[in-house]
Structures are given as structure tokens and as C-alpha cells.
Amino acid sequence: MKLIRWSGLVLLAAGLHLVAPVAEPLNLSTAKAAVLYYVDSGNYGREVAGVADEAKAWITDRASQRREGEKLALVLDIDETALTNLPHMREMDFGYLPAMWDDWVAEAAAQPIGPVLEVYQLARRLDVAVFFITGRKESDRPGTERNLRAIGYADYVELLMQPNDTRTNTRVFKTGARRELERAGWIIIANVGDQESDLAGGAAEKTFKVPNPFYRIE
């Protein structure tokens, strides 16, 4: 699958049938301004916090009902879930250049999304293991691991990333990864992500979607 980020809109070269609009669509400058207002007004942060609160309540309740021998796990996505790439997206005016994205990842400068970091911290206090499953490629591992450690996500069991030469779309990869964890004896009590493709396919007791007005990944 090829993902194209184009000034705040995303076109998918595979897996999405693009239909010509029958009328003039929303002006691109207007759409970007609306996204920035959503973020800068605090509405984006408040909605993320609301989803995180729901996840924390569920994890607390589920962990309190743990049966002897159960290996409970939380699965987190990375981009726009555990951490924010908004500074890079602003700098790029919501465009996407692969080389500049690679440089951003290698810089390991992304900051945590605070409410989701709280979900992670709660899970660890309750002895719920954490796995990261991301659409980032293996070539991104050094920068990603360094970034996670630097912003408070150091105590995780495993970071699962796509092979550099993968032809599998994100939805299929992430579903398969969760099913592998289940086969290894883990009970995924919560799966948190910003894309429908992070959450589709089951293999989790509950899913929690935080908002992402910036791009879409199939």
C-alpha cells in the first residue's frame, strides 16, 4: 500500500476507490484551517483525554477481575496515539516527504500524548504488560525505541514493526500481530489507536479510538 499525504488530505493508492466529486469539495486551505482550529482550541486534546479516561476505567476494572495465571496486555499504536508528530506536520504544512519523515523519526523528538501516557502508566502499575504495534518500518526502530524511552514509555514488552519490504497493509499486519500475541498466551484487554485500521480485526476485549483529523491509513 502506498500512502500519500497531500496538504492535510490522504490519498491511498490501494485499498480505496477514489470517486470524483459531483460538486466542488471543501477548499483545501479551509480544511487545514479547520484542523488547526480543532487542535489549537483544545477540542482535540479534550477528546483524546475523554477516550483515555474510558480506557483507564476499563483497564482498572478488568485488572481487578484478573484470574490466577492470566497474562493481561495493553496494545498501543505509536503515531498520533502514544506520541504526536504535530510539530513535523505543521512544519510540512501537512504535506509528506518520505526523506523528511525518516529524518523526523530518527531525530526521536516527538513528545508523548499525555492522556495516553497516563493509560500506559496505569497499565504498568496494575501489572498489565504493554506491546506497541506500529505501521512504522524496521528501519525506523532505532529512532522509535530511543523516542519511546525518552518520553516515558520505556517499560514495554515488545515493539512490533512492519518489515521494510512488506506488501501487507497496516490493517492486516496489526490484526495478525495481535493474534500472534493471543497465541502466545496474552489476553489483550485493551487496544488503543487513532486509526480504524489499528483496531479492526478483533483480537482484543475492548478497543479505544482516539481522534486523528490529520491523515488516514488503511
Image: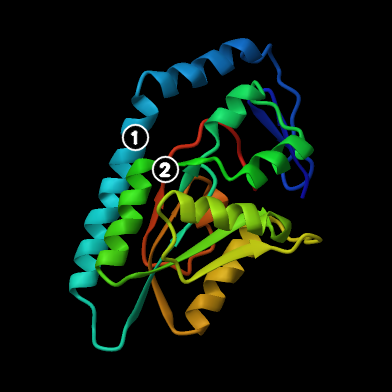
* Residue 79 seen in the current view: yes
Percent from the top left, x then y, of residue 23? 68, 13
Which residue: 76% across, 24% down? 20
Q: Amino acid at mark 2?
A: Val
**Left or right position of 11 against 54:** right
Sort mark 1 into few (<14), some (14-19) or many (20+) by Cα contacts within 10 Å.
Answer: few
Q: Nearer the viewer, residue 143 or 97?
A: 143
Q: Nearer the viewer, residue 196 or 95?
A: 95
Q: Image quarter for residue 87?
A: top right
Which residue: 57% across, 17% down? 31
Q: Which residue is denoted by mark 1 in the rendering?
A: 47
Query: Which label sits on residue 189?
Result: none
Q: Image quarter for residue 41?
A: top left
**Left or right position of 185 against 109:** left
Q: Secondary structure at mark 1?
A: helix
Percent from the top left, x then y, of residue 95? 70, 26
Q: Image quarter for residue 45?
A: top left
Up the image or down, 179 lies above or below 57; here it is below
Q: Which residue is denoted by mark 2 in the rendering?
A: 210
Q: Nearer the viewer, residue 215 or 79?
A: 79
Q: Amino acid at mark 1?
A: Glu
**Disc 2, disc 1: CB below 8 Å?**
yes
Which residue: 65% across, 27% down? 9
Percent from the top left, x then y, of residue 203? 47, 69
**Left or right position of 93 against 74:** right
Q: Secondary structure at mark 2?
A: loop
